[in-house]
């Protein structure tokens, strides 16, 4: 199965899940995608350790990261957003994580999955 088809399947599984810090927030959303692609669960060490975005900031600081974006940057090579491929990770609106899909970035919103123009991506990371 190619990456585009894998992404379609992954987005279908998370489409209706509501935003929940610590279990299904933007970091756990992209961690789930990376696990689907690579088999490695980079969210495992934080899943369930916080219940608010302030709690996320606290656990990131405890583990030596300024933010969840800095954690992502420690794992994956950065690339210009214009060069990102389907399935690469995006940072939008300063710290919201998403997944590139053609001309869109799929992100989490409070009520489920949403999307933005890929032109809204501020940073990109290759997986």
Image (spheres, grey):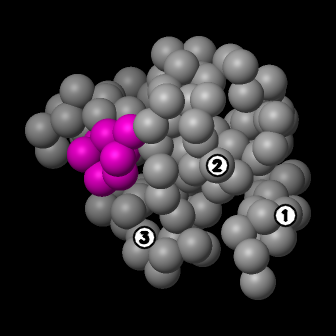
Residue behind mark 1: 8
Span colored in magenta:
71-78
Residue beneath label 3, please? 41
Q: Quadrant of residue 37?
A: bottom right
Query: Which label's residue is closer to the chain start, 2 or 3?
Result: 3
Q: Mark 1 or mark 2, which has the lower sequence index?
A: 1
Image position of 47 with respect to 119: above or below: below
Closest to the observer: 21 or 120?
Answer: 120
> Does the magenta run of residues contain 8?
no
Q: Secondary structure at mark 2?
A: loop
Q: Nearer the viewer, residue 25 or 114?
A: 114
Is 80 above or below relative to 77?
above
Q: Is residue 68 visible?
A: no
Tell whether 102 sits left or right of 72: right
- Above or below residue 28? Residue 65 is above
Element type where label 3 sits in the image:
loop
Residue at point 12% right, 38% down? 64
- CA distance separating discs 1 and 2: 14 Å
Residue that numbered label 2 is attached to: 85
Residue depicted at x 58% and y 37%:
83
Residue projecting furthest to the front: 83
Q: Main secondary structure of the magenta part?
A: helix
């Amino acid at each position: 199965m190619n990456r585009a088809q894998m992404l379609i399947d992954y987005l279908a599984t998370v489409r209706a899940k509501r935003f929940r810090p610590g279990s299904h927030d933007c970091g756990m959303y992209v961690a789930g995608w990376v696990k689907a692609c690579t088999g490695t669960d980079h969210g495992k060490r934080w899943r369930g350790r916080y219940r608010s975005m302030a709690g996320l900031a606290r656990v990131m600081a405890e583990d030596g990261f300024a933010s969840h974006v800095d954690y992502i940057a420690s794992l994956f090579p950065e690339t210009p957003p214009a060069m990102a491929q389907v399935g690469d990770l995006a940072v939008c609106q300063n710290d919201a994580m998403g997944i590139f899909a053609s001309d869109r970035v799929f992100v989490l919103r409070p009520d489920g999955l949403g999307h933005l123009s890929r032109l809204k991506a501020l940073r990109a990371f290759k997986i």
